[in-house]
Amino acid sequence: MRFGEGTEIFGPIHSNKGIRFDGLAHNVVTSALSSYDDPDHTGNNEFGVHTHVNAPPASGVNENFRSLEAPPNIAAARTDVFEVGRQFPVPTVDFTGLTNNLANIKSDAQASGKYFAASGNQGYQIILKTNKTFDVYKVTSQALAPYYCTNTAGQIGWDTWSVGDRQYVNNYAIPANGLIFVEDNVWVEGEIDESRITIAAGRFPDNPWTRPQLTVNNNLTYTNYDGTDVIALISQGNINVGLVSDTNLRIDAALVSQNGRVGRYYYEDDCSPYNVRNSLTLYGMIATSIRYGFAYTDDTGYQNRNIIYDANLLYGPPPSFPLTSDQYSILSWEEI
């Protein structure tokens, strides 16, 4: 995992692999590895959790191997980056156990929630509403990329992941059990008020080449931030922010990518004006199977990423949402 400059995270961070963190972490950052080979530069192994931010009074980021951030040295506190500290190695998190209930969500949605079979087109768009209903559209095409905007990074599954043409299907009440399962790609946006929802996307039998993707390009928000409102988005494949996305985007949700990543594809300079976006605020949590990211080192993507853990998720989780722990622990405190 790599968290670049411009990333500010309010909440704990853990990876079963290594973490390079160059933003500001307000809570503990942990890795299951004592050291690892950072794939973004050459050189020896560095700490399981390390930073390339130059130590004060210096500033900026050094992109090369950092000997002081590598064994056999002792990891410095670096409270300018890790306000509460970093820990490594720590026990791994059972990610398979976290994500293995997708088929159960499908069955429960078919029984007493809302289930949408394959669209025969690009997928479905779901727009949540504050009156406890949601509109569904069938997406018949994705938005076209600007003329010279291409997949220069050779990323698997690359597209604009933005809604082009669509056909209205219907308006539905949010089911009592809060479960919506889509056996296709799905785009989600809107606002809820006193609703608790899990939207999942998957195809069965599972095939790595046909796993659907779940995308949020426009604001997805709560009315209430006291635990009354909660959304989970669980994807068998990637969770995306597509090309044509809000330049200031807010996502209130718990995001889980079972086999892929949570993030944004690489849209290079020819994808202007959508290649550079301003700010992304995520209020919820992220669980990603492979490396996450909403920005790239050439300053494309979201320039500022604010990721805020929603503590209400632990004791008031979304419907059928998997948990990895059963209690809070004190990470930091302040006497006032």
Image (cartoon, rainbow, N blue to C red):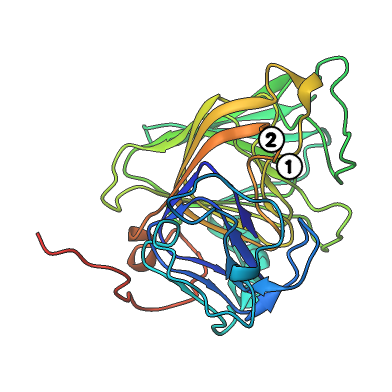
Q: Position of residue 314 (x, y in %)?
A: 38, 67
Q: Position of residue 293 (x, y in %)?
A: 65, 47
> Which residue was labeled with disc 1?
185
> Which residue was labeled with disc 2?
124
Q: Identify the residue at image location x=41%, y=69%.
A: 85
How dense is the environment of label 1, judged by Cα within 10 Å: few (below 14), some, or many (20 and up)? Answer: many
Q: Quadrant of the C terminus?
A: bottom left
Judge left or right: residue 215 versus residue 325.
Answer: right
Q: Nearer the viewer, residue 163 or 77?
A: 77
The local secondary structure at tag 2 comes to strand
Does the image show residue 152? yes
Q: Identify the residue at image location x=68%, y=66%.
A: 103
Q: Identify the residue at image location x=44%, y=64%.
A: 78
Query: Where is residue 184, by image quadrant?
Result: top right
Q: Position of residue 331 (x, y in %)?
A: 32, 71
Q: Position of residue 198 (x, y in %)?
A: 51, 53
The local secondary structure at tag 1 comes to loop
